[in-house]
Amino acid sequence: MAFRNFKMIGYVIYGRGSFNQLDEILAPNRKDGKPMIFLVDHFFEGKPLVNRIPLRGNDKVIFADVTYEPKTTYVDKLANDLKEEFGTVSGMIGIGGGSTMDLAKAVSLMMNNPGSSADYQGWDLVKKPGVYKAGIPTLSGTGAEVSRTTVLTGPTKKLGMNSDFTPFDQIVLDPELTKDAPANQRFYTGMDCYIHCIESLEGTYLNEFSKSYGEKALQLCRDVYVNKDGWDEESDDKLMMASYAGGMSIAYSQVGVAHAVSYGLSYLLGTKHGIGNCIVMNHLEEYYPAGVKEFKYMVEKNNIDIPVGICKGLSDEDFEKMINVSMGMKPLWENALGKDWEKIMTREKLRALYDRL
Ligand code: NAD
Ligand code: ZN
């Protein structure tokens, strides 16, 4: 048996107000006159956070349009524009939710690798390190701050640039940055973490490493969504650590059924990751009975709307497309259902599941 030897992020700073140390953190990573590029979630345009960005010299702020989840065409455009304007840059700093962090990782890689980001969708296809990159989450849950992938929708697939060069060199975990997230969005992204934990802890790839992080992340999710009424600073602090630990848990295991099915939705319908996972999780009693029961309790307790009926009126061809994308996520199915997963999750069974969504 070969054990996974995985690359982790470089530096981590955690704490309320730690964003204020960004200038000193970046200083040693600035390269002779080349700018730091701050890729900032467009939600923050015109907000006070922008004035706290430590701009020096020819540094540049770019607002990331995350109306849609990251596409390879967008990554290529951002990287090509930067190459044209500056040749190279000192670093990419992603400030935002999972989408913005993934964009920053991908653009960093594309500054030093030829071709299109679509050429690198897969496992270990990236050959050269990117430029210095830092991730600063403003939503908690995806684990994108610690992961070795950057999920992109390309011309033919929705798949990450999964490589040892993908993890951030630095992350800044400042829970204060998540305080203005709307309750529904915060819940959908937070549930991404909860679902990572259930899929990891119930999966066949589980080992003690994944379990240690997964159990802690699950407990933190329960603290904020089950055991507490209302939302406060402590909730933001806890959910940020849940996201980190949940990401560490799947680093050494894998996600499962909710993610495999939700990828099909997002490929065909553009359904966003967090809400898509919630839509699917709502119907997975057969696979994760205890997790789904608790999930439903959290939805109700926190007064969240989970859309239903999103596959109504789709054609057979549409369903086929979703089934193909979903069935392509082999490691996820294998983790969820074991080596013989194809005998358990047939195309017919998956079709019936999509029909219910
Ligand atoms: P997101 O980044 O797509 O953002 C969702 C919305 O929240 C956007 O409208 C954004 O502008 C807004 N927003 C962000 N921060 C805010 C704040 N502090 N206050 C108010 N609004 C704010 O959402 P997400 O759920 O964090 O990320 C989902 C993305 O992450 C997907 O693209 C998914 O593929 C990716 N993802 C990546 C990994 C990975 O390992 N790389 C893992 C899971 C998900
Ligand atoms: Zn996820």
Image (cartoon, rainbow, N blue to C red):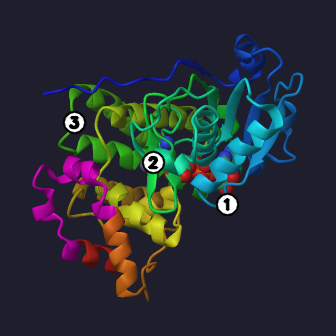
Magenta region includes residue 336: yes
Q: Tag on residue 128?
A: none
Asked if the residue at label 3 sits under 8 Å from ligand 2, the reply is no
Q: Which numbered disc flags the more N-terminal residue, 2 or 1?
A: 1
Identify which amino acid the numbered label 2 is placed on: Gln
- Of marks 2 and 1, the one in the foreground: 2
> In the displayed image of the protein, which residue is found farthest to the top?
28
Asked if the residue at label 2 sits under 8 Å from ligand 1, the reply is no
CB within 8 Å, label 2 to label 3: no
Image point (40%, 80%), residue name: 318
Magenta region includes residue 43: no
- Of marks 2 and 3, the one in the foreground: 2
Q: Position of residue 222 (x, y in %)?
A: 41, 42
* C-alpha separation, residue under disc 3 versus residue under disc 1: 35 Å
Q: Which numbered disc flags the more N-terminal residue, 2 or 3?
A: 2
**In what element is the residue under mark 2?**
loop
Q: Residues within 10 Å of mark 3 (few under 14, many from 20)?
A: some
For label 2, the residue is 121
Identify which amino acid the numbered label 3 is placed on: Leu
**In what element is the residue under mark 1?**
loop
Instruction: Give above or below for 240 relative to 227.
Output: above
Q: Is residue 198 left or right of residue 117?
A: left
Q: Which quadrant is the C terminus positioned in?
A: bottom left
For label 3, the residue is 206
Which residues make up the magenta segment?
Answer: 326-349
Q: Which numbered disc flags the more N-terminal residue, 3 or 1?
A: 1
* C-alpha separation, residue under disc 2 versus residue under disc 1: 21 Å
Q: Tag on residue 67?
A: 1
Q: Residues within 10 Å of mark 1 (few under 14, many from 20)?
A: few
**In what element is the residue under mark 3?**
loop
Q: Position of residue 57 (x, y in %)?
A: 89, 22
Q: Quadrant of residue 1?
A: top left
